[in-house]
Image: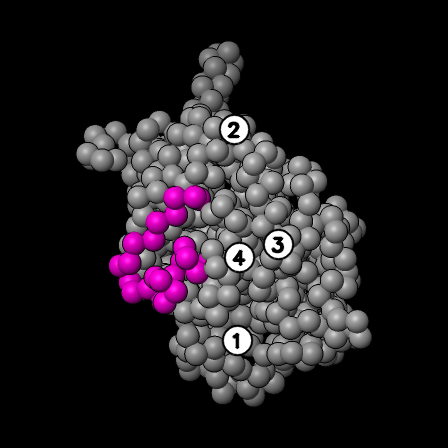
Amino acid sequence: MPTIRLAVLVVFLLACSLAAAAGPGGAAVATAHPLATTAAVRILRAGGNAFDAAVAASAALAVVEPGSSGLGGGGFWLLYLADTQRTVMVDGRERAPLAAAGDMYLDKSGKPLPRASLDGALAAGIPGEPAALVHVAHKYGRLPLARSLAPAIRLAREGFPVSEEYVGKAKFRLQVLRRHRRAAAIYLDDGALPEPGWMLRQPRLAQTLETLGREGRAGFYAGPVAAEMVRAVRAAGGIWRLEDLRRYRVLEREPVVFGYRGYTVTAAAPPSAGGIGLATMLNILEGYDLETLDKATRVHLTVEAMRRAYRDRQRYLGDPDFVAIPRARLTSEAYAAKLRAGIELHQATPSAALSDAPAPVGADTTHFSIIDAKGNRVAATLSINYPFGAGVVAGKTGVLLNDEMDDFAKQPGLANVYGLVGGQANTIEPGKRPLSSMTPTFVEGHGRVAILGTPGGSRIITMVLLGILEFTEGEGPTAWVTRPRYHHQYLPDVIQHEPSALAGVRERLRAMGHALRDVGRRYGDMQAIMWDRASGRLEAASDPRGIGSARVVHLHATAKPGE
Ligand code: DON
């Protein structure tokens, strides 16, 4: 009898673990551009897994959203490996060139050189995206790299009609694009702003992608492509050397993992500020019964959590290979309890009261989410920083350079282009990675899995926070990507918000001592997926603020012609 009972128990446990390990059967993809979503779906249908699809989506986004991410940039790819139930963060963040110096964006008298870390070749860090694509494809993919790059190569060579969004970004950066001959020749229509529908063709970028597919890492970081990039960067006033490219390495890092109300949150680790920031904010908020509170109190407490997390961002965070980060303490519940104790229920804490930090002197990126039939997942946020990065194309390679160096603290107290005031941990050093806000994230618990992330500079982390709160309150991905957004980043000491986000509570928040700033438009471009294990349902959603597309794919269906 006991043997039978034991056998039943073993079978039951086995069934449970199989059910937990089993994937959704179908797949889902959400990216910021319909052509990138199609590229990823095509690779899934060709037998690729989520990691192959991620390579296809990243490369396609590099082509169809050249203003947001690309081979000349970097990013973080958060992976969940269903077989081993392991999570890993692939860090393909740019590094400062080896000839970089702490004062490289200051003049002789110590004054900041206007826009030197934003426009032009001196603003460019050493790209990490090509190395990351090779790494993800070789280590985790099932298809050859060249196969996963094929849709992007075709889009680059044959061209595609640009969107209104593209035109908007090009208009925003028109001056810089016009200043650089090759950039103007590629991204503008005879030097003028293109109309929506204009065909953007990038044959040289197609060639570089082909070389990468054929030769792997060496196709970008050595040989003729590397030589041409270094030549072009130096001719345009930059400081890259061949050695910078040769020594670039992708790193695998342990993501930040913590609990929130029975959910496990897994998010980007330093050099992203995202995971630690989310842990601080959610650990603080776990001490309140948010759902029972009125909207004004709820916003107030969330803002106070944001303020404290961003204070710590400035104080402690940077490249973990260069600075010691008190990661365990910052993500602990005990630390959050201490911070929570300093929050008043109906009164804002002025940021100035939280530290002796100097006041600020002054006041495009992309994300995709993928799950495959086995349950492998990818959340990836990729960037060249400001729209169209540095605005410089590296010679005949067709690669648009990033301006990620602006994410460093260039001088104590000086804000970057997103208003983030830099701290000592994030000063420029040769080979260092600039601190990022990019926060690809998984949340899992209560039988449901969420995959999410967004572009949006310093506001990325708070957008992901608001998305997680929606999810843990039972909402689906359409609600996470749609909800109106608000943000606080410690400095400036003001709640930045979308026009409708604080409707009905503005006066109460002001009465509590909060300053409010309507940013005048909606922001973010969240791409999200939810898998409900119990019902087996997959849902995907693309932010209505952008032009992205989200698709749930039934892989047994016959492929449509052309797919
Ligand atoms: O890594 C970062 O935090 C920034 N370079 C991201 C820039 C960004 O999201 C721009 N998009 N709106």
Query: In this view of the protein, can residue 433 be seen by the observer?
Result: no
- Residue at the disc numbered 3: 235
Residue 245 falls left or right of residue 426: left
**Residues under numbered marks 1 and 4 in contact, where contact means CB atoms less than 8 Å apart:** no
Q: Amino acid at mark 3?
A: Ala
Q: What is the x, y in percent for residue 287?
A: 61, 62
Estimate how packed mark 4 is, as few (under 14), some (14 to 19) or many (20 or more) residues with alpha carbons within 10 Å. many
Q: Alpha carbon of mark 3 to alpha carbon of mark 4: how far?
A: 11 Å
Which of disc 2 and disc 1 is earlier in sequence?
Answer: 2
**Residues under numbered marks 4 and 2 in contact, where contact means CB atoms less than 8 Å apart:** no
Q: What is the x, y in percent for residue 449?
A: 44, 44
Q: Amino acid at mark 1?
A: Gln
- Residue at the disc numbered 4: 392
Residue 92 falls left or right of residue 184: right
Q: Amino acid at mark 2?
A: Glu
Mark 3 or 2, closer to the camera? 3
Query: In this view of the protein, can residue 238 be seen by the observer?
Result: yes
Q: Quarter of the image for the C terminus: give it.
A: top left
Which of disc 4 and disc 1 is earlier in sequence?
Answer: 4
The stretch of residues the image draws in magenta is: 183-205
Which of disc 2 and disc 4 is earlier in sequence?
Answer: 2
Q: What mark, if any, has residue 215 been given in the picture? A: 2
Residue 251 falls left or right of residue 53: right
Disc 2, SS = helix
- Residue at the disc numbered 1: 496
Which of disc 4 and disc 3 is earlier in sequence?
Answer: 3
Residue appearing at x 64%, y 66% in the figure: 116
Q: Establish if 86 lies above or below 200.
A: above
Q: Alpha carbon of mark 3 to alpha carbon of mark 2: how far?
A: 26 Å
Which of disc 3 and disc 1 is earlier in sequence?
Answer: 3
